[in-house]
Image (spheres, rainbow, N blue to C red):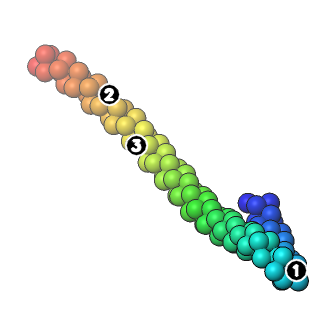
Amino acid sequence: MDFINHVALNSRLLGFNAAIEAARAVEYGRGFAVVADEIRKMAENNAKSVNDTKKILFNINNKVEDLFKKIRDLSDVALTQAVATREIATCLQNFEAGTQIMQKISAVI
């Protein structure tokens, strides 16, 4: 982006210099003045495009950072759920073991 911005700035200066030289050439420089004006317009459009592109890239970068944050948050939630699931599984195993003991006791009674 910096390179394109630099080229646009140099093109703008080239356009101004060409306009000055066209003015010096008076009638013979009219055609050259048109070219100089178009070069300046092109340079201004390039500079605007660079700024617009920088804004777009900045917004994309912010959205990617937000996405990474959300992924980290979801990862934390998934880890928390995994721990809770293991705890539930352990409780169910303990409950099953207790139920089996109760069945044996009730069979004896």
Three-letter amino acid code at the position of disc 2: Gln
Amino acid on which the number 1 mark rests in the picture:
Ala
Check the image and name the residue furthest to the left.
Answer: 109
* Label 2 Cα neighbours within 10 Å, binned few <14 / some 14-19 / many ≥20: few
Residue under label 1: 25
Q: Residue at x 24, y 22 (%)?
A: 101
Which three-letter amino acid code belongs to the residue tagged 3?
Gln
Position of 85 compared to 73: left or right?
A: left
The answer to whether marks 1 and 2 mark residues whose Cβ atoms lie closer than 8 Å is no
Closer to the chain start, of discs 2 and 3, is 3
Upstream in sequence: badge 1 or badge 3? 1
State how far apart marks 1 and 2 are (Cα): 97 Å
- Is residue 33 shown left or right of residue 98? right
Work out whether mark 1 precedes mark 2 in sequence or the reverse, and give the earlier one: 1
Left or right, residue 69 beside residue 108: right
Tell me where residue 94 sits by quadrant.
Answer: top left
Name the one closer to the observer, 102 or 79: 79
Evaluate if marks 1 and 3 touch, with contact meaning CB atoms under 8 Å apart: no
Identify which residue is drawn at 84% across, 76% down: 28
Distance, label 2 to label 3, CA atoms, is: 18 Å
- The nearer-to-camera label among 1 and 3 is 1
Residue 103 position (above or below residue 52): above
Residue under the image location 47 percent in, 42 percent down: 79
Q: Position of residue 7 (x, y in %)?
A: 80, 63
Q: Report which residue position mark 2 lands on.
A: 93
Q: Which structural element holds mark 3?
A: helix
Of residue 98 and residue 82, the one placed in the foreground of this image is 82
